[in-house]
Every structure is written in structure tokens, then in C-alpha cells.
Amino acid sequence: MSTVDENLSLPPASTAPPPAGFPLLATVAPLAAAGLIWSITGSAFALIFAVLSPLIAVASMVDARRAGRKRRRTETAAQAEAVTVLRLAITERQARWRESAWQQTPSARDIVLGRAAAARWRQTDATLVTLGCGPAPSGIRLGGATSPNDHRELRDWAATINDAPIVVDLMHGLGIVGAAPLPEALARAVLVQLCFALPPTDVGLDLNPGPGWEWAAAFPHDDVSPAARRIVLHQATAGTPARTARDLGQGRLLVAVATRLDDLPPGCGTVVRVIGPGRAQLIRSPNRAPAIDFFPELLTRAAAADFAVALARQARDAGLVTSAGAIPVGVTLTDLLAVTAAADPASVTPTGLGCVIGVGSAGPVHIDLVRAGPHAIVGGTTGSGKSELLTTWVASLAAAHSADQVNFSLVDFKGGAAFAPLGRLPHCVGLITDLDSQTAARALASLGAELRFRERMLSTAGARDLTELEHPLPRLVIVVDEFATMLGAFPELHALFVDIAARGRSLGVHLILCTQRPAGVVRDALMANCSLHLSLRVNNRADSQALVGTDAAATLDPNQPGRCVIATDTAEPVLCQVASTGESDILKIAARFSGGTAPRRPWLDALPTLVTEADLRRIAGEGAPAPGYPLGLLDEPDSQRYRVFAYAPELDGHLLVVGGSGSGKSTLLCHLARVAECPGDAPVAVERVSADVEVTWDALERVSARIESGQQTAALPRLLLLDDFDSVLARWQPDHRLAAADLLTGLLRDGPAAGVHLVVAVQRLTSTVPGLASLCPSTLLLKLPSVQDHLAAGGLSANYHATLPAGGGVWHNTRVQLLAPLPLPLQLTPLARSTAQLPEHGPLLVVSSSPARSAARLRAVLGVPVVELAGTTTPAASALISVETGQTDAPGRLVVVGDAETWQAHWTLLTRLRGQTAGGRASIVFDRCGLSDFRMVSHSRQLPPPLAPGRGRVWVLHPDGDLTRAILPQPDGGQASG
């Protein structure tokens, strides 16, 4: 037994003050002062001061002695107080050591009275036994003594602990001598302690037959086959030969009883003499040199016999001792169900969840999750049979109860192979394997919604628990395999399971949580509500003790999977062999309950990746219709339902759709245009604008002009659908980009008052249109390339789904799946593009970045001569062109071609041709010119409409100042592709 082994310090001893010296200066000073004054004044009265000298000397010495006595009294009081504090500290340490020592080696009296049940069959220092109580060294050393006799009484008192357990190690053997029956009473106390501390699986009991010891055969250790260690009880009598060291052998724990010291057998390293009922003497011990007296612990025969019987029963219940062959090596669930049905067909109660899961020493083993639970913890190392146990338990519950009585939600973090056959049972309402983050969030929401649903049902019926309902809901059993793995990936789920464990009993929701080491995973808040514990083989005794309260699970045969120890709060642990369940067994059970009504599913499946209009009609028929245009399905696991996703412009305002390539933006706009154009109570003008630089610009200008002119009113609502607006912005020139952003901002700001609502689809949310997200009250986030893009669009990181299918997105933090594309392409009437031709009358002044190419093209198309200004001086050009007649030297229409710099050089000629001529006022055509060329020649700040590349588009500045887009004819008589 270890001691405190602690050093404490004594308070410092008070020291005597040195004797007060003679006050020489105080004595001489008055004499010197009196002589000095007399010598100066000559007055005899000054000599009176000399009389003060002896008075001051005497007063100083008396005062010094008085101060010394006061200091000594103060120091003595402080030392006494320090000694009192030190005594309290020593007393507290001795009491703590004494309590710890008695807990480590409880007395036989505490054992038989059941005060030390937690230490039963411990393995730490199991061969240490308590012989009684007496003095023991404390290990407390008091330092700071100035002499050997300083605080001698205090130091002696601190070094010894009274009423401490007198502990010896039985590994050295124990001999007890004395007048009968005192040695036998002490030996009974020692034997009780040994059998209590050492499990019968590790040690056997070897009794030397003699009168008065028949009761010891009741110990479970007496039936154990030869073990590594044995407790040898020897009583030396006149006719009993002494045992030799060879008889005792190795690994024997010897307890010998004799009346004389000479009768003890060899091997008794510790010898105790019992002198009387209240006095014994430890006369020899390997760890104690001097003999000590102590108060022995004597136990009556009746108390020891009762304890032996009780201990044997506890060992049998814990499965530590069984008759050979009592528990079979294996049994199938089909055979087990047949036996139990024939033996007790009414063993299952309708209000419980009882079933048979295996066979024990007394026959089939039944467990009831309601009565013994309401929740269960299953532990076991790899290969011990955990998945088989869960499968058998679920299958047996399904065989004993219909789907109207119990449903199962199965969660398997080992891939789902073990639970896959159970999915065929009609009782199974959910099978989830290896959750991802989104599925874990849905599981949390679905289970929370199920609890709220059941609470509403109980509240509506005024019932306290499930059994009081007129039409009870089926009990829901949530089975989780590899619970530790699940919590490691999603620790936030632990709070949900704690909530279920706390409220599950009254709501009819039960947990079966399986993991390898429950003690390190399941926290106290959850473990406190899980009263049913099942342990298959575990790797160490600590895990077995933590789960089932005994070491039994750590001693199970690793070559016998399925061996299980079942522990409840109301009974001792029971050992059984779990039945094995094959797929054919499950199919037979499923066939018995086939054809019934499918149970309500509390676990809402994920949204389908393909949503059709038939799905929308079916979901809409289950609840109140949603206002607006139906476009998909919303996932609401917290309400255990799907809901139709509908866009209502009057309620939702402008809609911003953000999604990457292939995310379903264009499909959404097609469906929205088709649904909005369907005949209804309120006709809506729908314009679906493709991602075209010209078409988008024209639509923005046209709708803005209608609003400004008052043609657009709320009486005729208009829905403008802009596809890939950000890509169109990127293809415009900076001036067009800024102007288009202003047009769009104006529509978003002023459109609703005039009945105009916009749906703007973009690939990314950029700053090109300031405040676009704030001007659109509603945002639909489709799949984006990265979480950074999702966050930039205003989404939450928790709502980002990297594996979203096309059409999947988030609407107001709710997962949505849009309608799938129709099998045939939608026949939508595209907006008419500008297809104006070049002016048919009047001169044409062509500004081209490639004058020669444009001149050749115009000659071929118009069939008239074309004047090229390149290389022509101003006088020559004026001579070539007759300003008065508006004709060239050759007959035909006036067509003049030059680049912007040449026209700038012939500015006077340009001015004359722009004026009134015989052929009419001239129009300026800009072919392949930029804004700088247009403004250089036209001297106008007007912004021309954007031109799509590759379509033969040109700008035409008409004589009246109107600026339009036109098509330059092709040489073969056709037009450029529009």
C-alpha cells in the first residue's frame, strides 16, 4: 500500500532576543549638554541637566526588556497558530490517504454488506488483502526542525496513521495462528476478499477439506478448471500433513491456519498471531520489519456463506461460469423463432418491443427495448459480430411486430452492405449509408421534424405518451452502425441524438447505437438515457467494465463471434450466443407482412434529379396551391415534405438567377416563358431575350422607351427574361456596357410601377451592374463552379452543393430542383431583329476601315460606280463630284467611300455632300468602324446601337439625325446572316 510520501515544514522556532546593552550615548549626552551650557552661560542651573543622565539610562534599559517580552509573546502565539494549521493539514492528508486505502482494499465487512460492489473482480493489486485496522506509516515528513527534540510529539504523530488498513500481499503466502476459532474467522475474511477481487475466470479455489469449511465450495471459483493461479486454503490439524513447497507449486495464493507457529507449512512469508477478538499481531512480513499490533477483521461463517452464494449467482448471470455445452456455438434466427413461438406464442406484448435475439445458459434470451431501454448501446471490437447482432435484432423485431407497430431507420457507416437486406422489410422506412454533409443536415432536419410531429400528435390528443393515443403511431427505432465514425465526420449530430435520447421514451423513438468503444464516444448526457447495454468481445477490461459493469466481455473467446453480454439497470449481466440471420430469413419475414399499407416515412428522401410536370401536379394536389408560375420542387425536410417552387413576380419582385454553365438557367427561362404565356386570368406579355448583344440592347431600349412614353402600364404586365446577361455585358464595348447597365438599373428601379418585372440570369455576380443583387428582391442560386462564387452571390457556405445536378439550386436557403428540359425544343417566337436595308434614295457616304473592300462590294451589289477618296486630293475630289447636280462624271447614284482619316481630310467635301444635293440629302454609312471613327466623322455624342460581329451589320446616320442599324447586302444578292 503506497503512502502519502509528502514533505511539510515545521513553523520556525522563536529565538530569544539578545540582552539589552547599556545605553552609553543616552547617558553621556545629557552630561555633555549640561557642561556646554554651563561653560557658555556660567549659570549653575544648567548643571541640573546632568541629573537626567542616570534617569535616561535606567528608563532605556527597562523599555528594552519590556519590548523583548512582548515580541516573545507574539512569536509564541504565531508559532502555536502555525502548528494548529499544520495539524489540520496533516489530519486532512491522513484522512484522504485512509479513505483511498480502504477503497483500494475494502474490508470484508464492506464487501459482504455490498458497499464495495464497484470494485468486484478488479484486476489492479487483486492479491492485496486487508487483515484489519491499525497504525501505518503515513510517509509525511516534517522538515525544519532545529534540534532532534524539536516538535518531537508532532513529528511522531504525523508519521503514523491510525485506523489504517493493515494490508499484506498474498503472493508471499499468509499464515494465521492462534486459539480457535479466531484464526478461522480471520481466514474467512481473507478468502472473501480474494474471491471478491479475483474473477473466477482467472483463479481457482483449492480447499483442504476440513470441518467448518464446507460453505467455501459455494464460491464460483471452486468449479473452475485448472487455471494459472489458485487460492490454496490449508488448515493444519493434528492429523493433517503439512504441505511442502512442491505441493504448493507456482502461482499459488496460500492461506494457512494453525494453532501453533510450528504447524504452518512452508511458504508463509507473512505470519499473523490472533491474540484475541480485538487484538492481533503481525509478527512477520516481507515489507514490515518490526512486529505491529492491530485490530483484526473477523468474519462469521454465516456471513461468509451467504456472500459465497450471492457471488456465485452474480458470476453465472455475468456469464463468467457456465456448464460445459450449456450455450450453443451457433443458432439461426429461423430456428430460434420457431422454438420461442412454440414455447410461448404470447410472449410479445403489444405495448413493448420485445423479441428474442439469442440463446443463453437458461434458454432463449429475450430483450424488450421499451422496458429495458428505451435506448441501447452496443459495443464490440472488430470481428466480434456487431453487424450480425444488429441485423438479428432488427429482423427479430420485424418478425414479432407488424409495420404498424414498429418502423426502422437504418444508418450504416460501413458502406451499407450489412443493412442492405433489411431494406426489403416493409418496416424499413429509411436506409442511409456514409452521409455527406448535405445528407447529414437533411437527416438532422428530418429527425427533428419527426420529433415535432409526434409531439403535436400527443399534444392534440392530450396524451402523455404514445400508448395513450387512440390510434398509436408506430414506434421508430433508429439503428446506427459505427456511431463513432458518424460523429467523427459530423459532430453536430451528437446534440440531436442527445435530444432524441431525452425525449424518445414518450414519443416512441428509440436508439440502438453501435460502436467499437462506447466509453470513448458516447458522452454522459447520452449514455445516461441508454439503460440497455450489449457488449460483444472487447479488447480490454476497462471497456467491459464501462459498458456492462464486469470484465466478462473482455474474457470472451475471440474465436467465437456472436458471444454477447447483456446488461440492464434492473438485472445482472447475462451471457448469450446471438443468432445468425441470413438473407433468406429476412425474405421470409418480409413475405409475412407483404401486401400491407406502406408505413409513413419520417425520413424524407432527397429531391429527385429529374422533376417533371407530373411531379408538380402530384405535390400540388397534396397541399394548398402555391401562387405564381410553378417551376420545380422545394425540399423541406424540417417539415417532412416537398413543396412546389413557384415564382410570383408581384410577390417575389425581380428575380436574379445565378448559375454556371449547364446549371439550367436557359431551361428555367424557357419554362417560365412557356408557363407565363399559357392562357390565364391575367394575361402577361413575355419577352425571352437570348444572350445576343443586339437583341438584348434592343429589348432594354424598347422596354425603357415604353415606360418613359407611358405606353407600358400595370394594366398589361410584362415579363422580361434576360439570359446570360453578364456574358452579353462582357462582349459590349465599354460605352455600351455602361449604357446598358444604366438601362437595366432603370428598369429594375422603375419597372414594377409600370407592371414590368425582370428575370436576369447571369453566370457570376460581378460589379458590372452596381447593386444588381440589391435591386432584385429574390435570388435563385444554381450550381456554381466554386464555393467562393457561391458566397459572392450571397449564398451560405453550408448551402453549397458541389455535386448538384442540372437544375438544382437554392431558393431562400432551401434546396430546389427545377423542371427538367422538355423532350422537344420549345417553339418560342424570337424577338425580331433589326433587318433594315441601306437607304434606297440619296447619296451614300461610306466610312470604312477597309475602303477598297467596301467599294468593291458596293459596286457589285448596287451596280453603280463608287468613288474612292483614298489618294485623291481635295481639288481633284471636288472636280470629280458635281455638288450642284449631285452626280459623278459617270451616270448613276452617288456613292463615296473613304476611311475616317480621309473623310476628316476632306471635311469641306463631307459638309457639302451632307447638305442638299440634286439626289437628296446624303446618309453616312459606317462599315466596320469603332465609336471613335463614328464620332470623328459625325461629330455626334450619340451612342449607336451595338453590332454583332460576323453579320454584316453597319450603322446608318440618316439625314434627319436618326441613327439605326442596317445590313450590308452580300455580293450574291443575299444578306449577311442575322
Image (spheres, rainbow, N blue to C red):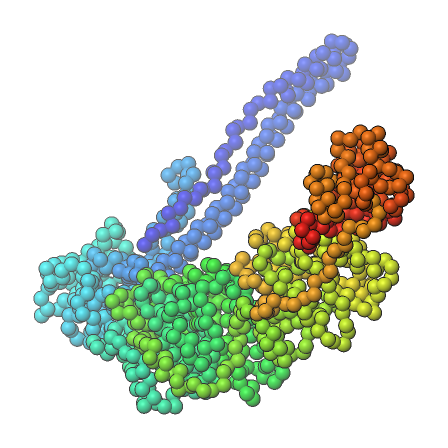
Q: Position of residue 115 (x, y in %)?
A: 38, 69
Instruction: Write down the quadrant of residue 715 in the picture.
Output: bottom right
Task: Judge whether residue 216 can be spotted in this image.
Answer: yes
* Left or right: residue 311 compared with residue 704: left
Quarter of the rendering containing residue 872: top right
Residue 897, percent from left and from top: 76, 39
In this rendered view, identify the residue nearer to me: 453 or 599. 599
**Residue 315 visible in this rendered orientation of the protein:** no
Residue 495 percent location from the top left of the image: 53, 64
Q: Which residue is depicted at the point 52% across and 77% down?
A: 601
Q: Residue at x 27, y 71 (%)?
A: 320
Q: Quadrant of residue 720 in the image?
A: bottom right
Quadrant of the drawing holding the N terminus: bottom left
Q: Position of residue 473 (x, y in %)?
A: 53, 83
Q: State the residue at coordinates (36%, 58%).
A: 101
In the picture, the quarter occupied by the C terminus is bottom right
